[in-house]
């Protein structure tokens, strides 16, 4: 039978015709399903829940010219400086008010010498130049969105990194992760630096802050710094007219068309300034819980013989981040983290919930790791490292910083009524996250990228529209998942004091779902990549509830495979 006859026969056969129609309907349904999924994710969820679209617009020329006004930023740490970089692209001038003179006068270079002290327990500690920054010498865990933002905000970032000798710290995100006694590696372990690959900087808070400050000063001539302490907000009708600043020369007023609270955990706008200026802020906006955890970080400077003889895959320069993370379901409440950073330094962090032992020597670190659940799966190169560090401990001159994580909170500004239209807060002035998860600076990056997107959508004239509402409404959905996810994990420990009105079972489903995704990902690389992408903030959290994962999760639960 030739093709023409076969087609004619098929069209005249009722059963064949029904089958073809059914196949057509099924194919159309599959196409519509795929298209609907694409539209939902790419056009709705990604723009709403992430900064992946907005980050592409950073530092692009503003349409209509700069707004003829001045921004006053209260606080000159990482959040304040990144906000200044964004605002300098949109306003004629920006003023940063920073309380620590050292930061303004010497904070653009990394000091060659450090000031140490010996504690009453006999171990070496350090005196940081930044008195208001917890663990100034500890590494930041910088998820890929931060490098995306920095590289766009500061086109000459590679030159600034070379100035500080940080070129070798730029790396593909490599995370060897242990959870529930199981080790996984990220999807980019064997990938080199190239376009489209998620990158990170393996640097300390000291290097991060100094790099940003120098980059800001050399790229934004319309940003100025003032040493002083903001003591209050000045009201001007229905909005803010500026701030009052206490300086060595006395009290002065600084005019501002937009006022940004970047005071960190102090949350100056929430606790004092807005109420005092006649803009009542309800205490109920702020929710808080206390994880009651502690951790210790040892900073080791590795001599050449240690770097050369350490058999880490790929060599010392591109050593991965090793993370042994607590697992509430398995009852292991302690963590262990290891990362290499600038100037041949290695940071080793121990600690967790339920009053863990503080480690102040390599012998104590080794004993601590040997007692962890899942330590038998630790790579051999990690144990060899312990041997090398113990052998060369005196040459490594380690010092230690102890930290107690206090109450964590979220000021839900998006729920506030009657805020001045030209006030916003960023960073810890909105949300203070558990630092052990390493999300704080990337969360600040979400804030300033959101601010850039809002400013691009308003006209270049004064007075400003209600920037406060535009910003907080856009920012809240992007950070709510961070709050819910870390809180759910912290609620896995009986010592955590929950948010008022909640108990420790609140959001337990989220913690267990994430854990199940990790275990499914051991055998399904696609699921592992999704989990990794969500945790690295290069995908919306809703990806963890895609039909593919839900079906496999239900199959595992009901059928056991």
Image: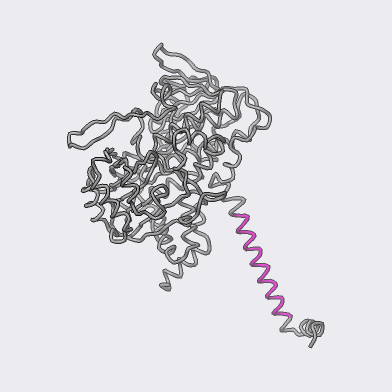
Q: Which residues are magenta?
A: 17-40
Identified at 57% across, 22% down, the residue is 93
Residue 109 in the magenta stretch? The answer is no
Identified at 44% across, 62% down, the residue is 521
Residue 161 on image: x %, y %: 48, 36
Q: Is residue 528 above or below residue 467?
A: below
Residue 360 on image: x %, y %: 23, 42
Identified at 29% across, 42% down, the residue is 298
Residue 22 in the magenta stretch? The answer is yes
Q: Observer-nearest residue: 374 or 250?
A: 374
- Residue 441 figure quarter: top left
Is residue 418 in view from this perspective? no
Please, which residue is most extreme toward the top here? Answer: 249
Quarter of the image containing the N terminus? bottom right
Q: Observer-nearest residue: 339 or 296?
A: 339
The answer to whether residue 87 is left or right of residue 172 is right
Is residue 240 in view from this perspective? yes
Q: Is residue 260 above or below residue 509?
A: above
Q: Is residue 404 above or below residue 538?
A: above
- Residue 31 figure quarter: bottom right
Residue 80 on image: x %, y %: 47, 30
Quarter of the image containing the C terminus? bottom left
Identified at 24% across, 56% down, the residue is 370
Please, which residue is most extreme toward the bottom here? Answer: 1
Residue 235 on image: x %, y %: 50, 20
The answer to whether residue 396 is left or right of residue 92 is left
Q: Is residue 514 above or below residue 350?
A: below
Dominant SS of magenta comes to helix
Q: Observer-nearest residue: 175 or 320?
A: 320
């Amino acid at each position: 039978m030739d093709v023409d006859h076969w087609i004619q026969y098929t069209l005249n056969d009722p059963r064949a015709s029904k089958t073809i129609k059914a196949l057509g309907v099924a194919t159309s349904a599959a196409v519509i399903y795929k298209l609907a999924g694409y539209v939902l994710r790419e056009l709705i969820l990604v723009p709403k829940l992430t900064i992946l679209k907005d980050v592409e617009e950073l530092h692009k020329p503003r349409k209509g010219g700069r707004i003829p006004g001045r921004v006053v930023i209260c606080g000159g740490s990482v959040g304040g400086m990144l906000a200044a970089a964004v605002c300098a692209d949109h306003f004629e001038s920006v003023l940063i008010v920073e309380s620590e003179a050292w930061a303004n006068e010497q904070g653009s270079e990394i000091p060659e010498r450090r000031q140490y002290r010996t504690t009453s327990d006999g171990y070496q500690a350090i005196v940081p130049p930044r008195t208001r920054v917890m663990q100034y010498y500890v590494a930041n865990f910088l998820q890929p969105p931060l490098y995306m933002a920095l590289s766009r905000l500061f086109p000459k970032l590679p030159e600034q990194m070379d100035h500080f000798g940080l070129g070798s710290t730029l790396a593909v995100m490599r995370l060897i992760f242990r959870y529930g006694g199981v080790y996984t590696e990220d999807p980019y372990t064997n990938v080199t630096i190239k376009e489209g690959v998620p990158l990170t900087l393996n640097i300390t808070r000291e290097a991060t802050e100094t790099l940003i400050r120098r980059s800001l000063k050399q790229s934004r001539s319309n940003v100025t710094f003032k040493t002083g302490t903001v003591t209050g907000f000045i009201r001007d009708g229905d909005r803010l007219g500026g701030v009052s600043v206490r300086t060595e020369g006395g009290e002065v007023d600084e005019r501002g068309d937009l006022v940004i609270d970047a005071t960190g955990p102090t949350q100056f706008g929430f606790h004092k300034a807005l109420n005092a200026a006649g803009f009542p802020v309800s205490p109920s906006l702020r929710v808080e819980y206390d994880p009651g955890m502690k951790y210790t970080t040892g900073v080791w400077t590795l001599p050449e013989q240690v770097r050369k003889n350490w058999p880490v895959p790929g060599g010392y320069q591109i050593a991965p981040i090793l993370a042994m993370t607590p697992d509430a379901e398995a009852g292991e409440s302690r963590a262990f983290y290891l990362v290499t950073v600038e100037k041949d330094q290695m940071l080793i962090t121990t600690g967790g919930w339920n009053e863990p032992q503080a480690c102040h020597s390599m012998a104590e670190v080794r004993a601590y790791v040997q007692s962890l659940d899942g330590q038998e799966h630790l790579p051999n190169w990690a144990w060899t490292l312990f041997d090398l560090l113990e052998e060369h401990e005196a040459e490594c001159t380690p010092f230690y910083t102890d930290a107690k994580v206090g109450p964590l909170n979220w000021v839900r500004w998006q729920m506030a009524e009657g805020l001045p239209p030209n006030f916003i807060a960023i960073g810890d002035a909105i949300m203070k996250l558990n630092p052990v998860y390493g999300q704080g600076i990337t969360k600040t990056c979400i804030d300033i990228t959101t601010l850039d997107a809002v400013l691009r959508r308003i006209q270049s004239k004064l007075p400003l529209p209600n920037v406060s509402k535009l910003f907080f409404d856009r920012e809240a959905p992007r950070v709510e998942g961070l709050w819910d996810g870390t809180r759910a994990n912290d609620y896995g420990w009986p010592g955590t004091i929950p948010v008022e009105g909640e108990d420790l079972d609140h959001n337990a489903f989220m913690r267990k779902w994430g854990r199940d995704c990790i275990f499914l990902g051991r055998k399904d690389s696609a699921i592992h990549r999704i989990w990794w992408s969500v945790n690295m903030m290069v995908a919306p959290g809703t990806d963890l509830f895609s039909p593919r994962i839900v079906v496999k999760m239900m199959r595992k639960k009901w059928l056991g495979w």
